[in-house]
Image (spheres, helix red, strand yellow):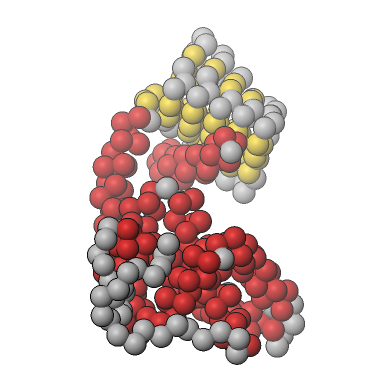
Amino acid sequence: MRRLSAVVAASFLFLLCVPSVLAADTLPHSGRVLMAFGGDVTVPAGEHADAVIVVQGTATVAGEVNAIVVVDGTVVLEGARAESIVAVRSPVTLGEGTVVSGDVLTLDSAVLKVGDATVGGSTRDLTSSLVGIGFVLGPAILLISIGFALIGLLAALTLAGLAARQVRAAGEVIRREPAQAFVVGILGAIVPPAVAVLAMVTIVGIPIGLVFLFAVWPTVAFVGYLVAAIWIGDWILSHLGTGRVAERPYAAAVVGVVILAAFSVVPPVAGVASLFGFGAVLILGWRTWRGGHRPATFASPAPQAPAWPA
């Protein structure tokens, strides 16, 4: 997991250093990119690379490199030429005769210049840049999250109004058969997409697979998320002692979507809840197709003891 995080960080930092590379642009470009994850990269004297990306390893450069990005490793330049360096938790040694025409960007990294090593740009800490990015992206991410939550809320209210009995029946599946719903949800998230991909090896199967992957499957998964949200809302309302089961679970839809939206900051929580709902929808759909299950009906919204969830 730590290596995966480091790889993502290296990719982000590589994009971050692109403007510096373009600004310097003193070295030619060959299209050669060298990468190592958990290993070392060496560029000997007389050789050139556009980029060197190393995660948990050592980048040793004696030739020419446009951009060097190292995370959780070591950077050693020996009489080399480079346009920019990004080092995260990686000490940087600029040996005798080394010339960096652009910037050296660091995060929790020390930079040692030996002899006549020079940096044409600046040597600066990335912390301030990352904080600035956070100030810009933070509000945008918050607004996007609110937008998705509003879409989910509108969809949940629509589902509660148009398919209340089916939603309640799926909720009963979650309550009475939670293990089965969870297992079917996992299988439903893995097996059908795999079958759709396999179907696309034939010309006839390509449109079928594409429609399933990008329309049918995401729609059913989203409905499963909404079913889980409404079930959670119903469970909370029933334990608050409301004393009745509403014919159409509008209040449960609002409560459940808000709860799952709040827990979306912890992706596993919302993901697990969605698997229960997804599995319940698949089970209900299968039983309905076979004619072995009919959604429960609600004859009257008269006050009664909460029948579910227990």
Seen at 56% across and 84% down, the residue is 293
Labels in figure, total: 0
> Which one is nearer the viewer's eye here, 157 or 16?
157
Image quadrant in which you'd find residue 48 = top right
Residue projecting furthest to the top:
115
> Which one is nearer the viewer's eye here, 19 or 180?
180
Quarter placement of the C terminus: bottom left
- Left/right of residue 92 with respect to residue 193 in the rendered view: left
- Left/right of residue 221 with respect to residue 147 in the rendered view: right
Seen at 25% across and 75% down, the residue is 303
Seen at 48% across and 32% down, the residue is 86
**As displayed, is residue 301 above or below residue 183?**
below
Quarter placement of the N terminus: top right
Residue 30 on image: x %, y %: 62, 46
Seen at 44% across and 22% down, the residue is 108
> Which one is nearer the viewer's eye here, 130 or 240?
240
Residue 195 on image: x %, y %: 70, 74
Residue 9 can be seen in this image: yes
Residue 150 can be seen in this image: no
**As displayed, is residue 240 above or below residue 16?**
below
- Left/right of residue 75 with respect to residue 225 in the rendered view: right
